[in-house]
Image (cartoon, grey):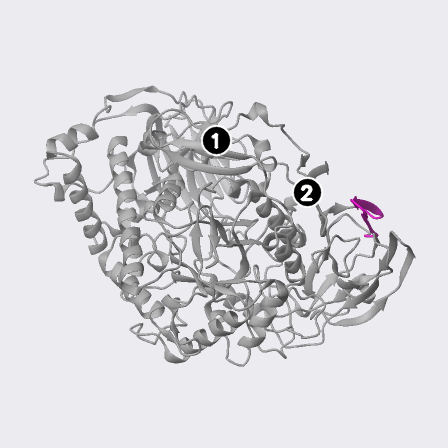
Amino acid sequence: MWKQVLLLCTLSLCVSLTNAQDEAPPLPDGWLSFPVSPYLASDDSLASVAFLNQGKADSRISVKGAHYVDERGQRVRFFGSNVCFASAFPSKDVAPLVAKRMQQLGFNMVRFHHMDNRHIWNQEQTALDPEQLDRLHWFLFQLKERGIYANINLHVSRTYPGMKDYKFPAKPRTFVYGKVLDKYFEPYIVLQEEYASMLMGSVNPYTKLRLADDPMIAVVEINNENTLMNMTMEGLDIIRDKDLGQALQAQWGQWLQKKYATLAAVLKQWNTGCNGVGDEILANGAFAAGETSWSFEGRKAGACEVSVDAEKGVCRLDITAPGAVSWAYQVHYVGLPLRSLQTYTVRFRARCEGDRRVSVCLRMAHEPWDVYTTQVPVQLSPEWQDYEVVVGTNELPAGAKHRLSLGLGAAVGVVELAAVSLREGADPKDFGKPASFAALPLPERGSPELFWKDFRRFLFETECGYVRRMRSHLREKVGVTAPIVDTQASYGGLYGFMRETRLSDYVDMHSYWQHPVFPNRPWDGKDWRIGNTPLSAVSNGGTLSSLSRWRHPDMPYSLSEYDHATPSEHQSEMFPMLSSYAAYQDWDALYQFCWEIQDTPDTPARLKGYFDMAYNPAKSLMAPFAALVFRRGLVAPAVEQVTLEIPEGLLESRLPFGFPGPGSALDGYPESALFTARLGTRVVPGDGPVRVSKSSEAIATGMPWQTPQISWTNPAEGRGRYAVNTPQLRMLTGQFAAGAEERLGDVLFRFQATEVDTVTAALAALDDQPLAQSRRMLLCVVSKVANSGMEWDEAHTSVSSRWGKAPTIAAAVPFTVLLPGDARPTVRALNPAGEPIAEIPVAGQAGRWEIQADPAQSSLWFSISR
């Protein structure tokens, strides 16, 4: 995820949340106090699903076919969360409570993330801190005793020793934490090997086993969210004159020497097709017709004034107000007749007052504003200069409109443009007379497309070599037997997918529904926003749709980070939708991000930030239901399998224009396959078009999507309804009006909400019996959650730093449930720990028992027994 400075974000939020513990403001009408925390582990909990973990986490995990299996060969699905930074090292007195709470919520996996940032090290980063390592070992032991396995991440956010000496600029953030660099730079690879040996070779005194030998270490991840294929032109400019660039250039020369017989052959190949540029495409690139065909994003009196001198052919932009977002000010030439897989040369003259870097690209002229080419950075100067950029388009969407875009950024100052030109083709590149392969340059802005094709192939193969080396080190030198993954499959686009499916033991992905956006400064705790709209109301599957395309049909599929960001007013929908859809698509591991362990058990609990689950009732209370659905397989996998086969030759043909992303092929799925079949993708040898194993004509299309157990509809604009109906469970989430009645089989829900909010309801048998026969059930109805006194902005897209105080509060949704069964049920309201606090009256008769509750007077979840 985009959490490269999540530590700073966490600290920022802690500052904003750590106000004096004044008395909390009065509860809003219709809300109740319902604080949860990572320490609520009660032996008297009636909401616990700890029974899902049968024994210790001591059965070695391996891969058999497309799934994880234990030592008996039985399939295992994993459900859990992430612990990050200090949360991976809880104090020894609270670790048993945390492990017990996780077990009660249904976890059988925890991902250890961001350990390497600073917490695990001594001050010099030369050895592991003994006290911290002891805390880690103790926590792992407690998890193992509770039947919870571990996913150990190796490199996540360590800043390698000496990196600060390079004095990288604040932007771009390409190399933060050594990312990209540590996939090829020998000193950083050695440091990774040493750390892996120290950590995985450490003996846990509580289990008497090295981590490498302990079966509770289920999987190991080498390098989180990282790929050498993210090496950008800006990044190359930064390292070109450093030893980092020299090391890359040396490896580049060696790679070329293996591919080509002579230097002359290299230079001839690179200039193939560079036969000069074609006719001018821009009719008004010189501004002779004023502003015709030009548009100016951010133009506004008092912020950005635009003037055109047609006689001189100069366009002047006078920016006097900082932009609210980094892309605030842009210049576009619209109405372009672009072609797919075509090289274009962009030329222009420009100057600026002050320091300004602009970006140049070709892109879509309407939503979703797809970028067709690389976004090439250009540094302007106070003096007029001529600039030339060569770019290549990807496959262009049919029917789309196109534009040339110059992004000016958000800073104040003057920018002047003149003589803007766009032509098909490119002029031959003069590479001089290099004396050896080692003297061949790294890419520059005017490098031909076949140069870039070679360079991108070099990056891919170099990264694959890195993965093989790290896997060999872990397997042969450290003795790790657990399944190993390199990084997330989408890092590197479809070449990243190839890397993972060929070299890793399983495929892993990350995704977030409406991740926070920080328009100006990364992870600014005051300046951020979220979409704050429900996933259930979209018609294209949203994150679930995009994730399903990255599964390989013959490998386990893991989602090691997923979340709907707090303080979204719709986040209660996350677990019902994710768990049921993942079960239907037959995925293998789900991890929410993340689980904070802060403060002490007696500190008043409140929402801790964008992702934390431990202090969030909208997420924590729905976790047991998700665990039942996913781990018990209450939703059956789709019978049909639809596989997209992508010829490697097709991907290779796209390399001159960039690493092909999912839009290059993954859109080949029929949309309706998302809810009629298990989806999978393969890269196969050969050439030709993308092939689908089942034609779109053979599959019904469009909403509503209906499977035997899942229904997803959009009854009105901006509203959705997602329902799960199995014999042992009913789950429902969506936007429901007051008095709405929703029937799921023999269960009826009626909500008395006063406004159209997202409401999530779940009813599950804890004894694995059909609901009508079940003797132990859990019921939960939850909607919005907040901190006391939390303040939204007018658009309800941010609370800035106004997160409020403890305790956590929740919007109460008065409801009625009609329950089947012959025996009269006993219904008890539960406190946040799952302990009974009050009995709820039950009316009705056999087969139609009526449970009516006003949560504002009691709870958000309830135990049902008979």
Q: Where residue 87 sits: x, y (%)? A: 50, 70
Mark 1: which secondary structure? strand
Which label lies toward us, 1 or 2? 2
Residue stretch rendered in magenta on the structure: 737-753
Q: Report the Cα–Cα distance between label 1 and label 2.
A: 39 Å
Residue type, label 1: Met
Q: Where residue 643 sits: x, y (%)? A: 48, 34
Q: Are marks 1 and 2 in contact (CB under 8 Å)?
A: no
- Badge 1 local density, few (<14 within 10 Å), some, or many (20+)? many
Q: Which residue is mark 2?
A: 709
Question: Dividing the picture into quarters, in which one does residue 358 lie?
Answer: top left
Residue 788 vertical placement versus 734 (above, below):
below
Q: Which residue is mark 1?
A: 364
Q: Nearer the viewer, residue 72 or 169?
A: 72
Residue drawn at x 31%, y 60% as measured from the top left: 474
Viewer can see residue 307: no
Residue drawn at x 44%, y 50% as measured from the top left: 64
